[in-house]
Image (spheres, rainbow, N blue to C red):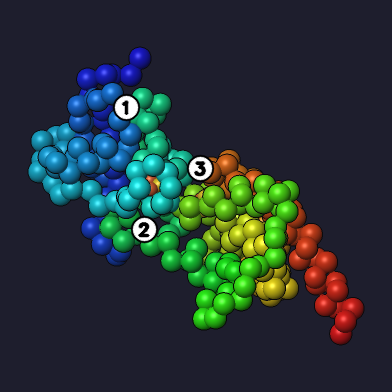
């Protein structure tokens, strides 16, 4: 049984985006129901390493503390997951915390996830209504479509799927599973579908859906259980149909 008196952690630290990373070890008192974020708060209250050396509080991102904002994603014992919902009693110890490896480190466990938002812009992941004048009521969405869309709308932009994806690298420029799933969401929306062709065209060619090797790592780590592989196969089929229809129209 895990030690219920103390919790040991090994944390990878980096002072700035270009500094050399280093590891620090900590030991904090165990409390019932602790999660990784509460461990980081405990360390911040008294930033002293296990060896007794004074250090600085760990920098990390966090906001909602209930797996909704997506900000606290990091590598916990090597797996991409959310710190606020990672319960200490369910983790092997010492708990190893590292920043995501595929995103630029800002400091310690905080990374820059701009690439996801750039990819969402690339695929126009929005409903094209700017609110400058009243368009009246939009078309109704069937219950079946609503039920299919709801799980896709639960994405919290955490980037776990991109971190875990073997194809998400600088050399491929792959948009990643989250952006592809948002294409499926907005293309099934009655008003959002106005941009359907543009979204599918954005997924053709380099960095597009063809880069996916269907390894399914993404769906395994998604904290919101989004059916990512179903989105990838459905959108993949639509991309092919769109490419063929564009080709015949030439
Ligand atoms: S199926 Fe595999 S290659 Fe495709 S997005 Fe998911 S993890 Fe990446
Ligand atoms: S699809 Fe899942 S893993 Fe990927 S960003 Fe959205 S919530 Fe996170
Ligand atoms: S703090 Fe919001 S998801 Fe963890």
Q: Is residue 225 left or right of residue 243?
A: left
Q: CA distance from mark 1 to mark 3?
A: 19 Å
Residue at image coords 53%, 52%: 155
Q: Quadrant of residue 9?
A: top left
Query: Disc 1 on helix, strand or loop?
Result: loop
Q: Residues within 10 Å of mark 2 (few under 14, many from 20)?
A: many
> Residue 186: x percent and y percent?
64, 63
Residue 52 percent location from the top left of the image:
10, 36
Residue 154: horizontal and vertical position, in percent?
54, 50
Earlier in the chain: of badge 2 and badge 1, it is 1
**Rendered residue at 32%/50% (across/down):** 62
Q: Residue 223, labelled with which disc?
A: 3
Q: Describe the element under mark 3 as helix, strand or loop.
A: loop
The residue that mark 2 highlights is 111
Relative to 189, 175 lies left or right: left
Asked if residue 201 lies left or right of residue 250, the reply is: left
Q: Secondary structure at mark 2?
A: strand
Cα distance, mark 2 to mark 1? 27 Å
Residue at the right extreme?
Answer: 248
View extreme (bottom): residue: 250
Work out whether residue 205 can be spotted.
no
Q: Give the vertical position of 22 relative to 5 (above or below).
A: below
CB of mark 3 within 8 Å of CB of mark 2?
Answer: no
Asked if one can make out residue 39 in the rendered structure from this viewpoint, the answer is: yes
Label 3 and label 2: CA atoms lie apart by: 18 Å
Task: Mark 3 or mark 2: name the one nearer the start of the chain.
Answer: 2
Q: Which residue is mark 1?
A: 33
Counting every numbered tag in the picture gives: 3
Q: Is residue 98 left or right of residue 22?
A: right
The image shows residue 104, relative to residue 205, as above or below, that is above
Q: Is mark 3 within 8 Å of ligand 2?
A: yes
């Amino acid at each position: 049984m895990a030690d219920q008196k103390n919790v040991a952690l090994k944390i990878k630290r980096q002072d700035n985006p270009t500094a050399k990373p280093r590891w620090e070890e900590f030991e904090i008192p165990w409390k019932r129901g602790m999660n990784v974020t509460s461990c980081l708060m405990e360390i911040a209250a008294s930033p002293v390493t296990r060896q007794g050396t004074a250090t600085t509080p760990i920098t990390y991102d966090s906001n909602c503390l209930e797996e909704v904002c997506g900000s606290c994603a990091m590598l916990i014992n090597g797996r991409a997951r959310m710190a606020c919902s990672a319960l200490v009693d369910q983790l092997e110890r010492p708990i190893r915390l590292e920043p995501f490896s595929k995103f630029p480190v800002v400091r310690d466990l905080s990374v820059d996830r701009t690439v996801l938002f750039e990819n969402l812009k690339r695929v126009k992941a929005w409903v094209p209504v700017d609110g400058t004048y009243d368009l009246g009521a939009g078309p109704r969405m069937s219950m079946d479509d609503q039920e299919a869309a709801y799980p896709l709308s639960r994405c919290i932009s955490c980037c776990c799927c991109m971190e875990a994806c073997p194809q998400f690298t600088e050399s491929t420029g792959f948009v990643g599973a989250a952006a592809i799933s948002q294409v499926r969401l907005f293309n099934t929306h009655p008003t959002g579908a106005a941009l359907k062709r543009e979204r599918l065209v954005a997924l053709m060619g380099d960095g597009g859906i063809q880069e996916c090797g269907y390894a399914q790592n993404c769906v395994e780590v998604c904290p919101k259980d989004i059916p990512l592989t179903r989105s990838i196969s459905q959108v993949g089929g639509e991309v092919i149909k769109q490419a063929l229809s564009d080709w015949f129209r030439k």
